[in-house]
């Protein structure tokens, strides 16, 4: 977007049992706050018909866990897809085997300026953190998490070269506490080659841990919003402004 264009973006870590009315409650809250684009994880529902939002929900149980949403009066979709960040398998807390980590992305074009926003969302494996080190009893999850972070950098490099966006915004359920210097440095170091840096939430997004966050080339002012049932995370709202 140009250097003076403001973007209000949100990340919502969802809940697999949440239905359309639950998502509608969250989207209406975001709409009231002027949100124009968002990424969501654990979202298996079509929600775009509920308000003035549009949505890219990829097909398939793995890809569909992450979705990108945007306000139709601000953006139009120019391209979209999914990218494997890693195909390393791991078991979830429920015992199901996940075949890897998939990111969902959309290239959005501003209806007024024709500037392009690349919006990507992903969900990294859980239970990998033990303080400032990786968990010793979750080898498969840790391996997938590390590979997914490397895959995220490679994916962003490829997409920015192919699509030449004016702005890039990533949000993830990182599943590590980015308020801790160790994890923040690990992620920022991985994203530095593509020019991105985390914007740290001012409060916990899952209990007292700040595991949901945006990364962008721009500085962001971050708010943590009230939790809505049945979701267990608190949404994150980031207002981006300034130079790209």
Image: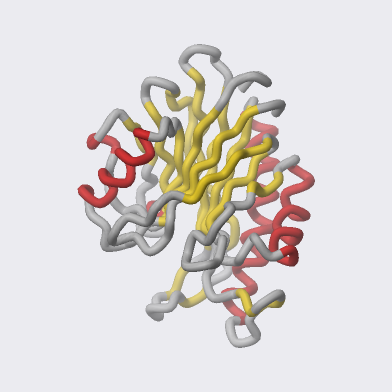
- Of the 4 image quadrants, the one containing the C terminus is top right
How many numbered markers are drawn?
Answer: 0
Q: Does residue 84 appear in the picture of this structure?
A: no
Q: Residue at x 62, y 35 (%)?
A: 168
Q: Is residue 133 above or below residue 37?
A: below
Q: Is residue 52 above or below residue 64?
A: above
- Which x, y percent locates residue 140? 58, 78
Q: Residue at x 35, y 53 (%)?
A: 43
- Of the 4 image quadrants, the one containing the N terminus is top right
**Nearer to me, 105 or 69:** 69
Q: Residue at x 74, y 63 (%)?
A: 181
- Which x, y percent locates residue 142? 62, 74
Q: Residue at x 61, y 65 (%)?
A: 177
- Which x, y percent locates residue 217? 69, 37
Seen as rendered, the residue at the extreme bottom is: 137
Apparent side of residue 72 relative to residue 83 in the rendered image (left or right):
left
Apparent side of residue 141 relative to residue 12 in the rendered image (left or right):
right
**Nearer to me, 225 or 231:** 225
Apparent side of residue 228 relative to residue 196 in the rendered image (left or right):
left
**Splitting the image into 4 quarters, where does residue 53 fall?**
top left
- Which x, y percent locates residue 182? 74, 66
Apparent side of residue 90 relative to residue 190 in the rendered image (left or right):
left
Q: Does residue 170 appear in the picture of this structure?
A: yes
Q: Is residue 244 above or below residue 59?
A: above
Q: Is residue 77 above or below residue 232?
A: above
**Splitting the image into 4 quarters, where does residue 95 fall?**
bottom left
């Amino acid at each position: 977007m140009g250097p003076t264009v403001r973007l209000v973006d949100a990340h919502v870590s969802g809940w697999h049992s949440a239905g359309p009315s639950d998502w509608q409650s969250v989207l209406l809250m975001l709409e009231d706050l002027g949100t124009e684009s968002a990424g969501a994880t654990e979202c298996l529902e079509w929600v775009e018909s509920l308000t003035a939002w549009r949505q890219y929900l990829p097909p398939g149980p793995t890809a569909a866990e992450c979705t990108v949403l945007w306000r139709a009066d601000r953006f139009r979709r120019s391209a979209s897809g999914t990218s494997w960040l890693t195909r390393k398998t791991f078991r979830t807390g429920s015992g199901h085997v996940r075949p890897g980590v998939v990111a969902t992305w959309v290239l959005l074009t501003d209806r007024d300026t024709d500037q392009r926003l690349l919006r990507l969302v992903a969900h990294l494996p859980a239970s990998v953190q033990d303080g400032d080190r990786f968990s010793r009893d979750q080898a498969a999850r840790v391996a997938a998490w590390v590979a997914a972070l490397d895959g995220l950098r490679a994916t962003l490099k490829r997409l920015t070269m192919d699509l030449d966006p004016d702005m890039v915004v990533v949000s993830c359920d990182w599943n590590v506490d980015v308020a801790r210097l160790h994890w923040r440095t690990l992620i920022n170091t991985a994203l530095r080659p593509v020019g991105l840096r985390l914007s740290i939430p001012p409060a916990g997004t899952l209990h007292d841990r700040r595991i949901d966050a945006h990364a962008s080339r721009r500085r962001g002012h971050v708010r943590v919003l009230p939790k809505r049932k049945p979701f267990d995370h608190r949404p994150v709202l980031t207002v981006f402004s300034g130079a790209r």
